Amino acid sequence: MNLIIMGAPGAGKGTQAQIISEKLGIPTISTGDILRGAIAAGTELGNSAKSYMDRGELVPDDVVIGIVRQYLESECCKDGFLLDGFPRSIEQAEALQKFGVKIDAVLAIEVDDDKIVERMGGRRVCPGCGASYNLKYKPPRVPGRCDRCSAELYARSDDNPETVRTRLATYHSQTEPVKKFYAERGLLVSVDGNNGIENTSGLLQKALSRLTEKDDTAEE
Ligand code: AMP
């Protein structure tokens, strides 16, 4: 399946993407993770993206579109993929359409803004494998250490309250219209993400099962 997962910053896209990727055996392409990796490695891409990310703004479309294109054309995505954090603007959605890849569904996780702000304060991320934790809702087994690779967890610099407010405003103005874009094409499936990781995962699972059943019926 070729899937997209959408949602405001802190809605739980990364966590749910990891669960879906493992269940379906498809890779997650997270533009946020790729950009953070580039910053950590000190590449030209990282240096140019950093100031946008620190301000909570979107990195320019042409940069992100180029990255995603490279991944989608590579061997890793030939049997399906899950895009996390892309597209985030109408320009990006249109570019993806022009790549000629068929998207099967767009999963949107809906979370209230006040909950987002509360969640972001407690988010901790693993620099090694990208796993995401929350001090209140999904704490690591050993405080401060990743469950999977034991690396020391850190708080993302763009998770501070001021940047979170800008990121939410950016989401509402530039990314929300992308949901309409996919709704008009009959691809949008929205689930309530306000009630915790397991509840949201269950709702996404049900939505994906319905999609698979629909696919099987169409093939018969
Ligand atoms: P995320 O990890 O998905 O929350 O992304 C963190 C930051 O990376 C965003 O606030 C943007 O600055 C940048 N970013 C990630 N994905 C995109 C994208 N598709 N378009 C533009 N900027 C992006």
Image (cartoon, rainbow, N blue to C red):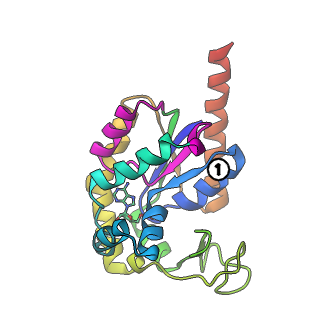
Q: Is residue 135 left or right of residue 110?
A: right
**Range drawn in magenta:** 75-102
Is 205 located above or below residue 166 in the figure?
above
In percent of the image, x 59 and y 38: which residue is there?
Answer: 80
Nearer to us in this view, 55 or 139: 55
Q: Nearer the viewer, residue 203 or 21?
A: 21
**Residue 180 sits inside the magenta stretch:** no
Residue 38 in picture, x, y percent from top left: 43, 68
User: Which quarter of the figure has residue 92?
Assistant: top left
Is residue 37 shown left or right of residue 161? right
What residue sits right under mark 1 in the picture?
21
Q: Residues within 10 Å of mark 1 (few under 14, many from 20)?
A: some
Closer to the camera, 75 or 128?
A: 75
Where 45 falls versus 178 (above or below)? Answer: below
Coordinates of residue 195 in the picture (x, y in percent): 58, 60
Q: How many marks?
A: 1
The C terminus - image quarter: top right
Look at the image and tell me whether residue 194 can be seen.
no
* Disc 1 secondary structure class: helix
Residue 18 x %, y %? 63, 57
Ligand 1: give its quadrant: bottom left
Pinpoint residue 194: horizontal percent, then vertical percent.
53, 60
Residue under the image location 36 percent in, 79 percent down: 161
* Residue sitting at x 49%, y 64%: 33
Q: Which image quarter is the N terminus in?
A: top right
User: Most extreme residue toward the top, as rendered?
Assistant: 220
Q: Is residue 96 magenta?
A: yes
Q: Amino acid at mark 1?
A: Ser
Extreme residue toward the bottom, this view: 143
Give residue 179's quadrant in the image. top left
